[in-house]
Image (tube, rainbow, N blue to C red):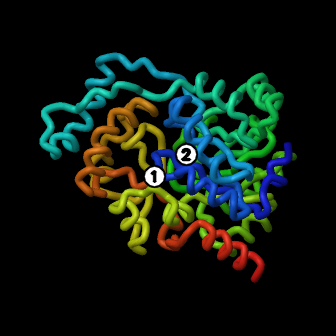
Amino acid sequence: MKVLELMQYPIIQGPMAGGFCTPALVAAVSNAGGLGSLPGSLLSPAVLREQVGQIRALTDQAFMLNFFVQKVPQPSEEEIASAAELLRPVWASLGWEQLPRPTLWCQDFAAQLEAVLELRPAVVSFTFDILDAAQVERLHQAGIAVIGTVTTVDEALAWQAAGADAVVASGVEAGGHRGTFIGRQEDATLGARDLWPAVVAAVNIPVIAAGNIMDGADIRAALDAGAQAVRMGTAFLVTDEAAVHPAYRAQLLSGQASTRLTRAFSGRYARGIENRFMRQMAGVEALVPAYPVQNALTGSIRAAAAANNDPELMSLWAGAGVNRARAMPVAQLMQTLVTEMAAL
């Protein structure tokens, strides 16, 4: 399946896990001529079915689902205790006597994949790791296009070899979690404007550009670099349809946000607006357990921060271009982007 034929405009809304990408947001993007994306990584198969049903009630256009390729971890009691101790300065500041124990480390990816085969979205994309060729073929047999997320040329070549229909080349400026799966995350440092043409030159499947794309001029630059479409996350995070906590939204729209990478919240490098949690954990973030264990352990802290309207302890994921974000309804943003592209 040719992914690009599913859209009127070469604009894919980035799948931002955490409840921000509502079915209304996904459907609005697809209805406006782009490709809406639902992040399914944190959703059980039952919730996934429910939200896909809601999207389909709001649009008859194509949309995408996105997942983290991962195994359910089995951390030892010692590892859990050590990780909780590293977080002590944070949870103690909330007046807690101990860090609550998560009931679930992550969703079962194998069960999620079976749900995808049942739901048959037009497109499914993956990050954090790679599918094998047999898994890609199963999706193709179900009529589902497959997109892999990459941060290096080697990763793009690996996804092409596995049979992917396209790859998202995500520069280091992109908000949220890095998709690195070959080599150390710390070594995948290519900026978007360098990564895009390098990946385009290396593969013969379509390349979708991501990282610091906020307006029509950015889209045009990506297309000029050889990409056939763009994926935009932060730009859609401040639209009216996104379910963003008010305190988080205020930070996104402050015009003075400073972003950087951290693994302190989740155990995997991710770009977000710098806050007290990131500063407080900076000295020990190299020691925290890998995703999803750290992500689950900080879940109660982030939930308490949301309840307290305290952005200093929230994971404020955002791309490097956040200070250029524009608050408006999805339909207006899409039309603005298309108009800006046409002007160039």
At label 2, counting other C-alpha atoms closer than 10 Å, the crowd grade (few under 14, some 14-19, many 20 or more) is many
According to the picture, the residue beneath numbered tag 2 turns out to be 178
According to the picture, the residue beneath numbered tag 1 turns out to be 261
| Residue 257 in the image: above or below residue 98 | below
Q: Nearer the viewer, residue 39 or 222?
A: 39
Identify the residue at horizontal 85%, vertical 47% (top origin): 2
At label 1, counting other C-alpha atoms closer than 10 Å, the crowd grade (few under 14, some 14-19, many 20 or more) is many
Q: In the image, 148: left or right of 103? A: right
* Residue 64 shows up from this direction: yes
Residue 27: x, y in percent? 63, 54
Identify the disc placed on residue 341: none
Q: Which residue extends farthest front?
A: 57
Q: Amino acid at mark 1?
A: Leu
| Residue 37 in the image: above or below residue 300 | below
Residue 312: x, y in percent? 28, 56
Residue 342: x, y in percent? 77, 78
Quarter of the rendering occupied by the N terminus: top right
Helix, strand or loop for disc 2: loop
Helix, strand or loop for disc 1: strand
In this rendering, the count of numbered labels is 2
